[in-house]
Amino acid sequence: MKIVSNFPKKTWVIFSVITGTTTILFAKCDSISDGNDRLGFPFPFYEYMGGKRSVEPENRSSFNSIYFLFDLIICFGLAYFFTFLIQRSKK
């Protein structure tokens, strides 16, 4: 895990907070009322199709690993940027 040790701990904490917050804030949970659930921002990486369908799908849930990776890269970029701003303001 050489990559993990190259970044400050603050970056990983900020990354975790940003990832968790954006996932919770932008989650769409409508499967209870015949809608779909979606997780991920800006790219929805997980979707659950709720409700009744005229043609029942084989799999109601789908996970897109590319969108998940894009979301993580964007969140990490924001975390690194915020860490840079914090270090710059301390000087």
Image: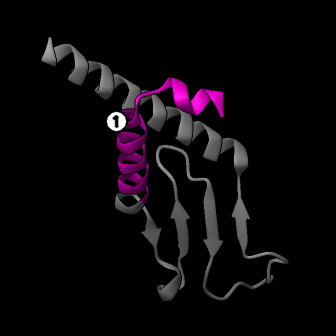
In the rendered image, residue 37, in percent from the top left (x then y), is placed at 54, 71
Q: Is residue 4 left or right of residue 80?
A: right
Q: Quadrant of the C terminus?
A: top left
Residue depicted at 79% across the width and 83% down the height: 56
Q: Quadrant of residue 12?
A: top left
Location of the N terminus by quadrant is top right
Residue 85: x and y in percent read 24, 20
Give the image location of residue 48, x and y in percent: 63, 72
Q: Considering only vertical position in the picture, is 83 above or below 35?
A: above
**Image quadrant of residue 26?**
bottom left
Residue 3 position (above or below residue 71): above
The magenta-colored residue range is 1-23
Nearer to the camera, 30 or 10 = 10
Q: Is residue 47 above or below residue 54?
A: above
Position of residue 30 in the picture relative to residue 50 (left or right) = left
- Does the stretch in magenta take in 56? no
Tell me what residue is drawn at x 61 percent, y 81 percent. Answer: 50
Tell me the amino acid under the disc marked 1: Lys
Count neighbours of disc 1 (C-alpha within 10 A) and say few if under 14, some if 14 to 19, many if 20 or more: some
Q: Position of residue 25 (x, y in %)?
A: 34, 59
Secondary structure, magenta segment, majority class: helix
Q: Farthest top residue?
A: 91
Name the side, left or right, on which 48 lies relative to 22: right
Residue that carries the numbered disc 1 in the rendered image = 10
Most distant residue in the right direction:
58
